[in-house]
Amino acid sequence: MSLVPLGTVAGVPELLIRPVDPHDDADMDAFQEVYAAAELAEDPDAALYSRADGVALLLSSGRGGELWEGYGAFTGDGMVGELIVTGNVHDNLQVARVFIWTHPSHQRHGIGTALSSYADERVRELGRSICHAQARIGVDRANGNRAFAERMGYVLANTEIERKLPLPPDLDLLDRLAAEAAPHHQEYEIRTVVGPVPDGLAASYVALRNMMNVEMPSGDLEVEAGEMDTAELAVQDRYLVDAGRTRVASYALDSSGTVVAYSVAAVSNEHHDHVDQWGTLVHPAHRGHRLGMAVKCDGLRALAEHFPEKRFIETTNAETNAHMVEINEALGFEVAEVYGDFQKRLP
């Protein structure tokens, strides 16, 4: 896609939006700088994705089950805003997720509006009709996010709460909670792996992971079950390695060795001090055995053992997900932020 002139934006003589090249150091340096500046302006303790994350994601586009496209908005000052458009390539084909950041020194000049309009057109070109976006809405510094989203035609469809737990965790607490849960799942094996998903677990893990969209509370967001396969899982694990991240996953296995519950975290690279909790899910047929608590405790214990230098882990749950919220609060997670999930139907 070539450079696209978007005409005059208020206070900006000319704005150009074009794809960024993950092989171009200048593009990716600027892409990371705009993103980090915008995130930290809203939350000085934000858990940032790294430059290596951005490069690895863009290079994995279409191969790991997801499309990833990055765009920069440029003026005479260089890159002043950016856009990511992403979506699954096998399922939820009507939906694209949109992420927009404007550098704090260039906000309120219409750059975000221009990027949102550009995103609408790109989503249409991809043959999709629904945009999903997420933004902080729970603190004074982010109060404008909801107003901006609604001005762009989005409606609030779900509310999620971000919670953080300082690391390393309280090991005595983990031992106590795990011991309380253990009598309820004696027929299951709890196994934790630091690194890629083992081949013997990949198929059943993917089958369970594909249920995540429809099993977790999502408010009024339109979602379908996933259709990831093991080949795409392998691409995701290669992305983690390329980004300097490490998967830490705890699995609950039934008597046949099938994954029936999991808790997956992604440890940031050496330049960052946080861990992202990616997801925890128990198969509906195996609930009631406190497997959620078991896999969470085992995963946190592995983080303490293998990554003692990390400072915190963050997780996000829908406010209606009472069971998982109860588990996280018992583990010591505390509310850090409120996010809004927004949805827009393109006419």
Image (cartoon, rainbow, N blue to C red):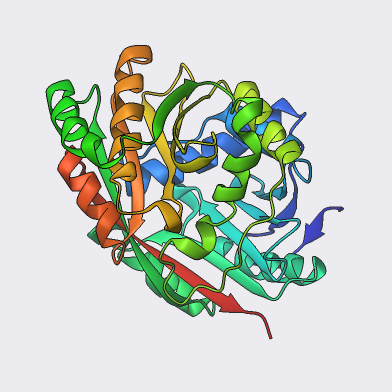
Q: Residue furthest right?
A: 2
Q: Residue furthest bottom?
A: 347
Residue 265, image x, y percentages: 44, 34
Left of 125 or right of it: where is 64? left
The quarter of the picture where residue 236 lies is top right
* Residue 347 in the image: above or below residue 63: below
* Residue 68 in the image: above or below residue 274: below
- Going 26% across and 46% down the picture, which residue do you hit? 163
Front one among 76 and 263? 263
Front one among 77 and 299? 299
Front one among 64 and 151? 64
Q: Is residue 313 visible?
A: yes
Residue 206, image x, y percentages: 62, 44
Residue 345, image x, y percentages: 61, 80
Front one among 199 and 157? 199
Total number of numbered discs in the rendering: 0
